[in-house]
Amino acid sequence: MKTEDLIAAIAADTASVGPSIGRRTVAVLALGAVIAALVFAGLLGPRPDWRAAVETVRFPFKFLPTLLLAVGGIGALVRLSRPEGRIGVWGGVLGLAAGLLGASVVVELTVEPPSRWATLMIGHNALHCLALTPFLSIAPLAAALLAARHGATTRPRLTGLVAGLAAAGVGATLYAMNCTDDSPLFVALWYPLAVAIVAVVGARLGRRLLVW
Amino acid sequence: MTSGRETTEEIWTGWMRAAIAGDGRAYRDLLEALTPRLRVLVGRTLAKSGAPRADLEDIVQETLLALHLKRHTWDPGQPLAPWVWAIARNKTIDALRRRGRRAEVDVADVADLLPAEPERDPTEGRDVERLLGELGERQRDIVRAIGVEDRSVRETAERLGMSEGAVRVALHRGLKTLAERWRRSAS
């Protein structure tokens, strides 16, 4: 078949194009987040003392890096879903999440005596955090990868990793409502480990699923 | 950047917007205008990696199909060219990778043993011909009728005793299947 013939066939295919990649990604991920939220509500729910906890400083602060991770991850995912896309400003948002976490550790180290550091860091829920954050990220990760498959990334592994970050942002935000360890020393150790698990899974799946 | 180049870009971008709105004529103009540029770009990438030019037209054709099926990933607020080149580059690298994987026998070593290839039209794709053979009969007939025989959707529908809508659906599915097979093909 000659190239001009192929062009004629392509040009005759006037099937409608559908929603933009950005809108579609956000919609599909929102669906994944709703599923994860339902699973969370059904199996875990917020910690019993959450009404008192929201009055503290540490508990609400946990959501800042997790939400920034979700927002930065989704933004970066939309960008990378285009063949010529670069992460751009969304890398800054992801960096801000990490920076805030780092800064909160410094503050915590100055206000807490060294004798308490180890206790705060190890906390009570480390294994929960490592298991439940990835578990709650499953539906968002499936959604993120599905959305990215519809796109056309030229960097499947990186895009899969970013899909993992976005999903883990959702999963960690939900888990944080249940988790009773609020010290930045705990959050800055165990949450990133849980996020890394999801990101690695995302990158591995991305390599397989995001080629087109 | 010269102003002439900017104008070309603007024309392309305008054609693509019209194409997405359903203008088949503008779409054809655009793809025909892009093709020689794609040949240059793909040829340059092949030369850089020391690969033979034999695959050039196949890669150009695969790129054209990818542009079509991934056109929703173009942001209408952005210039078209960088998006096109990114897809072409990606498809060329994929083709080189596939070639690397199957390059167990260097053709040059056995060239003497192979019958001389008959002269062929350099714009003739080999992959697409083989992959078309793997499509269902109906889809293949429709892609051929509209592509090779240059018939309209309506003519094709009349000839095959189908509705125009059914022809459109079969054409779209046929092109999609073609792209999927292309990606998976070892050749």
Image (cartoon, coloured by chain):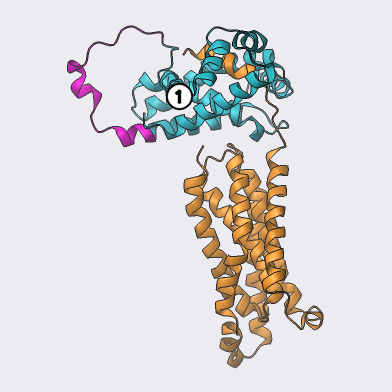
Residue B125 falls in image quadrant: top left
Front residue (pair B114, B166): B166
Give the labeled residue for mark 1: B59
Q: Locate residue B162, reporting x and y percent.
A: 64, 15
Question: Which residue is at a point 37% across and 32% down the rendered structure image?
Answer: B186
Describe residue B88's horizontal placement relative to residue B80 as left or right: left
Front residue (pair A97, A194): A194
Three-letter code for the amino acid on which mark 1 is drawn: Ile
Compared to residue A109, the image places residue B139 above or below, namely: above
Which colour represents chain A?
orange
Dot 1 falls on a residue whose secondary structure is: helix
Q: Locate residue A98, reporting x and y percent.
A: 62, 65
- Magenta stretch, residue numbers: B97-121
Q: Locate residue A161, reporting x and y percent.
A: 54, 54
Kindly tell me whether residue A193 is visible in this rendering.
yes
Which colour represents chain B?
cyan
Residue B31 falls in image quadrant: top right
Front residue (pair B96, A118): B96
Compared to residue B127, the image places residue B117 above or below, namely: above
Question: Which residue is at a point 69% across and 32% down the rendered structure image?
Answer: B78
Question: Which residue is at a point 59% across and 21% down the rendered structure image?
Answer: B171
Compared to residue B8, the image places residue A127 above or below, namely: below
